[in-house]
Each structure stands twice: as structure tokens, then as C-alpha cells.
Image: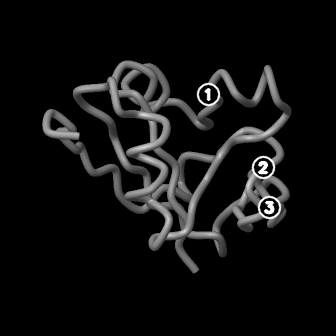
Amino acid sequence: MLIYHIALPEDWELYRHRPSYQPESLESEGFIHCSYEHQLDGVLKRYFGGTDKVVVLAIDTDKLLPKLIEEPSTGGEIYPHIYGRLNINAVVSAEPRDLGNM
């Protein structure tokens, strides 16, 4: 199964050649926010409206080393959360996305 994480380009660039990725949310909230494919557009609009560019990471859950937990968000919708550093070999694609018109 694939899940998705939206990264800022500078954050992805910092970690993409390392063994693991750890965005700020891992430190501040204890997990890495992820989405299912059908949730991506809503997450981009809600949380990245003022951002010009992002990188959408597709993550293969079969290759994921840390614990993955599906949890309800504030609105009750279920989202996947990664509890630990994301092992880079679980990232199957990193698609740059221009959000200039959002």
C-alpha cells in the first residue's frame, strides 16, 4: 500500500541522501503526518496554501520500518501517521509539485 507525505523541498533535499528522514513534526508531535492518495488535495489546500512548491513522497508501507498507525484527525477523518524516522528506502517516488495557483 502507498501512503503520502508532503515535504518542503528544502527539507527533502536535506534528508534524501541520508538513511532516514525526520521532519519537524516528528520532534514536535512524535509522528510524521501522512495521507492517503484521496486526501492529498485537501491537505495541500488546508496546510500548504501559502507555499509555492512541495515534494510529495510516495511511501511503500511494506518497506516501512517504523510503526504506522491510522488515527483520526481533528475532524475525525482517519490519516496514517509514522511513529519514527522514515527509512529512505521506503520512499518509492518524490514528485515535485508547484502550488502557485492554490
Please report contact status of discs 1 and 3: CB closer than 8 Å, yes or no: no
Name the N-terminal-most of marks 1 and 3. 1
Label 3 packing within 10 angstroms: few (<14), some (14-19), many (20+): some
At mark 3, the secondary structure is strand
Q: Is residue 85 left or right of residue 95?
A: right
SS category of the residue bearing label 1: loop
Expressed as whole percent of the image width and height from the top left, the position of residue 27 reads 79, 22
Q: Amino acid at mark 2?
A: Thr
Give the camera-side residue of 97 and 75: 75
- Which circle marks residue 80 in the picture? none
Instruction: Specify whether 84 is left or right of 21.
Output: right
Residue 74 shows which numbered tag?
Answer: 2
Mark 3 lies on residue: 68
Q: Amino acid at mark 1?
A: Pro
Pair 1/2: label in front: 2
- Residue at left 61%, top 53%? 34
Task: State whether residue 4 is above or below residue 27.
Answer: below
At numbered mark 2, what does the secondary structure look like: helix, strand or loop? loop
Q: Position of residue 80 (x, y in %)?
A: 71, 61
Q: Position of residue 35 (x, y in %)?
A: 57, 60
Residue 78 quadrant? bottom right
Relative to 73, 96 lies left or right: left
Q: Residue at label 1?
A: 23
Residue 37 position in % (x across, y down): 46, 70
Q: Earlier in the sequence, mark 1 or mark 2?
A: 1
